[in-house]
Image (cartoon, helix red, strand yellow):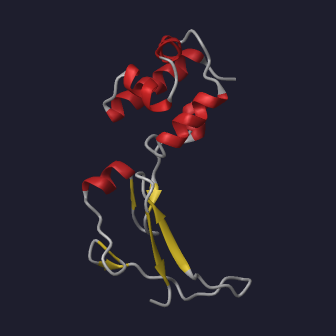
Amino acid sequence: MINNIEFSERLRKLLSYYDISAAGIAEILGIQRSTMSHLLSGRNKPSLDVVLKILKHYPEVELYWLINGQGDFPKKVMLTKEASLTPQIATQQKISFDKATVDSQELEIPEKKTATNKQIDRIVIFYTDGTFSHYNSNS
């Protein structure tokens, strides 16, 4: 069960992380300001609709962290087996994709076959602005 006060604290952390006001996030999520005010005060529990809107607009938020405080915020994104970067750090480092390179390291598509003899055909990267890039293994 969701604890209203703890949820409001996590919501405040989200607002602080993105440096956005309660009115600003209400507008982004398409909810009323009063709804956001009630959530921040701990008066109301979040509806499933509000939770899903937060997850849709803020991919760095983990569901379990938002609901019950378990997990990490911001969510860690694995770029390689050895290194992980949060989305905020990744954008600050201006990772560029030029002929399948990431920060001067080749983006290699593994040639290893899976247990079902399948090979990777392409990788698709989706950006927050709705655009995407794709890389084929044969190009």
Q: Identify which residue is drawn at 55% across, 33% down.
A: 66
Count the numbered circles shown: 0
Asked if one can make out residue 68 in the rendered structure from this viewpoint, the answer is no
- Residue at 45 percent across and 56 percent down: it is 77
Residue extending furthest right? 116
Residue sitting at x 50%, y 12%: 34
The answer to whether 103 is drawn above or below residue 137 in the figure is above
129 or 135, nearer to the observer = 129
Q: Which quadrant of the structure image shows residue 94?
A: bottom left
Q: Position of residue 18 (x, y in %)?
A: 34, 35
Residue at screen point 62% across, 18% down: 45
Q: Is residue 133 visible?
A: yes
Instruction: Answer with left or right where residue 115 lies relative to residue 102.
Output: right
Q: Quadrant location of the N terminus?
A: top right
The part of the image, by quadrant, that contains residue 97 is bottom left
The location of residue 123, given as percent across then percent down, is 51, 74
Question: In the rendered view, does 23 fall on the left or right side of 56?
Answer: left
The image shows residue 125 at horizontal and vertical percentages of 46, 65
- Of the pair 36 and 80, the residue shown nearer to us: 36
Question: From the image, which quarter does the C terminus lie in?
Answer: bottom left
Q: How far across and down, in percent of the image, does residue 37 sit?
A: 47, 13
Whether 27 is drawn above or below 130: the answer is: above
